[in-house]
Amino acid sequence: MSNQMPMQTQRRFRTRTRTKDSEFNLAFQIIAYSVIVVLSLMCLLPFLLILSGSFTSNESIVRDGYHLFPTQFSLEGYKMVFKFPTQVLKAYGVTVFTTVVGTTLGLFFITMAGFVLQRKDFKYRNTFSFFIYFTTLFGGGLVPWYIMLANYFNLTDTYTVLIFPGLMTPFLIILMKNFIRSAVPDELIESAKIDGANDFRIYCSIVLKLAMPGIATVGLFLALGYWNDWFTSSLFINNPDMYQLQFYLYNTMNTITFIDQMAIGTGVTLSQDVPTESTKMAMAIIVTGPILFLYPFVQRYFVKGLTIGAVKG
């Protein structure tokens, strides 16, 4: 009897502990999911307001403000943007071209640089890594950068100037080096060498396949950088047919704002003729739409790429 009583007490204690743990886990899950839902709605709400505003008449926005659903449906913002469809399509073509070519070449160079810098048999890997990291702390500045590309390389009004500056980003090189180091064991590379594979074969057949999460992450960063770039066009592009989409819409919006301000200064209101607010919202949707459709295709790689190496001891 004396042995049975402690056993029953231990069982009751374990049952109570499990019950408390399950209640705690349930409470934690409820709080965690509630926080995630609230944060998701906070992130989604601005986009829904922009989407609704793009389909709302300018007079309704000026009078009543923004709503989650259009109070007065209108396509005047999109009509204003596509008033000259040829220019918009050209700007779209330039942006798509620079994004695809720049991302492809950038991934090729960055993955090769990361593969070389993580190789322990590369004698000067720490020296080159320091030089790359040093550029993130100190730079020559805007004026020397402009003079080098415009006067020495003669890249003004060329597609090369829209692609070349973003090919090799120091942060992405360091990121890719850490990805490859975490994903590709040194023993695997050594065994491939024993089997007779050269460095380029190892890079193509092993590194690129195992580092796919990191490649997707870096590729998304590169694509976003090229897609959202407008500053390069403002500095080096004088031909309107070579404007990137962001810079073209930026110029369009500035022109509309200038006309509206000039009209107000002369005592004439053109808010009904120039849909400034709805045009802004339509531009935001046109610019962000394609990149939003791209994200779901790389999401699973992107999440895995951000967490790779987190559980590697």
Image: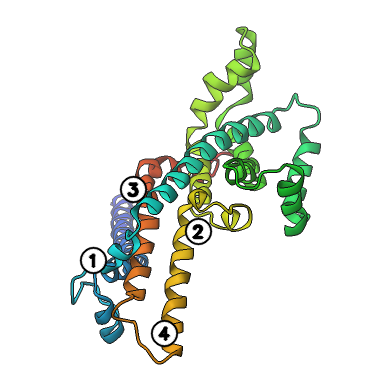
Indicate the position of residue 118 as horizontal and vertical percent values.
68, 32
Q: Which residue is mark 2?
A: 247
Q: Say which element carries label 4.
A: helix
Q: Say which element carries label 1.
A: loop
Label 1 close to label 2 by CB (< 8 Å): no
Quarter of the view holding residue 25 = bottom left
- Which numbered marker is on residue 293? 3
Q: Say which element carries label 2.
A: helix
Q: Which residue is mark 4?
A: 263
The mark that comes first in sequence, 3 or 4, is: 4
Q: Which amino acid type is shown beneath numbered disc 1?
A: Leu
Label 3 CA crowd tier, 10 Å (few <14, some 14–19, many 20+): few
The residue sitting at 59% across, 22% down in the picture is 203
Q: Which amino acid type is shown beneath numbered disc 2?
A: Phe
Label 2 close to label 4 by CB (< 8 Å): no
Label 4 CA crowd tier, 10 Å (few <14, some 14–19, many 20+): some
Q: Which residue is mark 1?
A: 75
Quarter of the view holding residue 49 = bottom left
Of badges 3 and 1, the one in the foreground is 1
Measure the C-alpha gap from mark 3 to mark 1. Answer: 22 Å
Indicate the position of residue 177 as horizontal and vertical percent values.
63, 37
Measure the C-alpha gap from mark 2 to mark 4. Answer: 24 Å
Tell me if 74 is positioned left or right of 81 in this view: left
The residue sitting at 37% across, 89% down in the picture is 268
Measure the C-alpha gap from mark 3 to mark 4. Answer: 39 Å
